[in-house]
Amino acid sequence: MSVIVLDQEILHYEVLGHGRPIIFLHGWVGSWRYWIPTMQAVCVSFRAYALDLWGFGDSAKNAHRYTLDQQVVLLDRFMEQMGIGRVALVGHGLGAVIAMLYTLNRPEFIDRLMAISCPLDAGMLNARLRTAGPGELADWLLGQHPSTEPARVDAPRTDGQAVQVSLSNFQSINLRDQIKWMRTACLLVNGQNDPAVTPPKLEDTLNLPAQFHSILFEQSGHFPMLDEGSKFNRLLTDFLALDSGMSPRELQLKEEWKRRVR
């Protein structure tokens, strides 16, 4: 287990591989652990880091650090202490919100961003996220499959207050308006059957900035990286292979990544 001390608090992370840096940020359920298959898929060409956010996994449980602002500071301080410069970010749920907020504030450090199951405003979130405990959320959002066990096992180790504080903070945030000014290449990935975060509507995807693209996984719920792991890893590999500054809309050249609209 790898840890560093940030502001006198223990931050847990793991790392695999060598090459350009990529950071994975987990969501409201689980910890760094469910990223292992994805980290293994990219670690040949990338140095892949995965963190436990404040209140999750093996990182410190301190209610004063559970705000979205403090989680963004965690990411900034981690990159500074580890000597990480320009990086690719992959965030899921809560991690996607943090990655978006960080990119909006520090775009010079982000080469590209994949935001999975990311709400663009509070209206896209199911109210059950705010009423259920970590274990109940895991039962609700994770299917009964061996690939989901890492998230299910670590869910009870979450401080429920970390989930609730972040959701409360998000009520006053509208990413839909803020991303209009983003120039960082960003790929939005959603599961068609996600009960927690409603996928973007067609009109939302048509109004995305030029550097954005939206892809829908039709057989996935809240965890596309677990529900359709092989397909997700191919998409991430293709996204990372794009030249720096290139719009992820170039992925539309591959039939497999065209967003299907019913």
Image (tube, grey):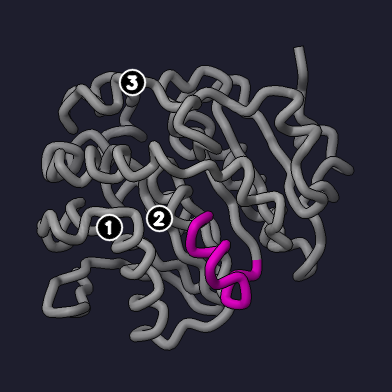
Q: CA distance from mark 3 to mark 2?
A: 22 Å
Q: Quadrant of residue 20?
A: bottom right
Q: Residue furthest right?
A: 253
Q: CA distance from mark 1 to mark 3?
A: 22 Å
* Amino acid type, residue under disc 1 in the picture: Leu
From the top left corner, tell me how far across and down residue 217 is, in percent.
61, 28
Q: Secondary structure at mark 1?
A: loop
Which tag, 2 or 1, sits closer to the chain's start? 2
Which tag, 1 or 3, sits closer to the chain's start? 1
Q: Residue at x 58, y 41 (%)?
A: 232
Q: Residue at x 40, y 69 (%)?
A: 16
Helix, strand or loop: magenta stretch: helix
Q: Secondary structure at mark 3?
A: loop
From the top left corner, tell me how far across and down residue 145 is, in percent.
33, 25
* Amino acid type, residue under disc 3 in the picture: Ala
Q: Residue furthest top?
A: 262
Residue 103 falls inside the magenta stretch: yes
Residue labelled with disc 2: 25
Residue 137 against residue 157 in the figure, above or below = above
* Amino acid type, residue under disc 2 in the picture: Leu
| Camera sees residue 258 | yes
- Position of the C terminus, as image quadrant, is top right
From which residue to which does the magenta span run?
100-111
Q: Nearer the viewer, residue 6 or 21?
A: 6
Q: CA distance from mark 2 to mark 1?
A: 8 Å
From the top left corner, tell me how far across and down residue 150 is, in percent.
26, 41
Side of 200 where 26 appears, left or right:
left
Mark 2 near mark 1, Cβ–Cβ under 8 Å?
A: yes
Residue labelled with disc 3: 127
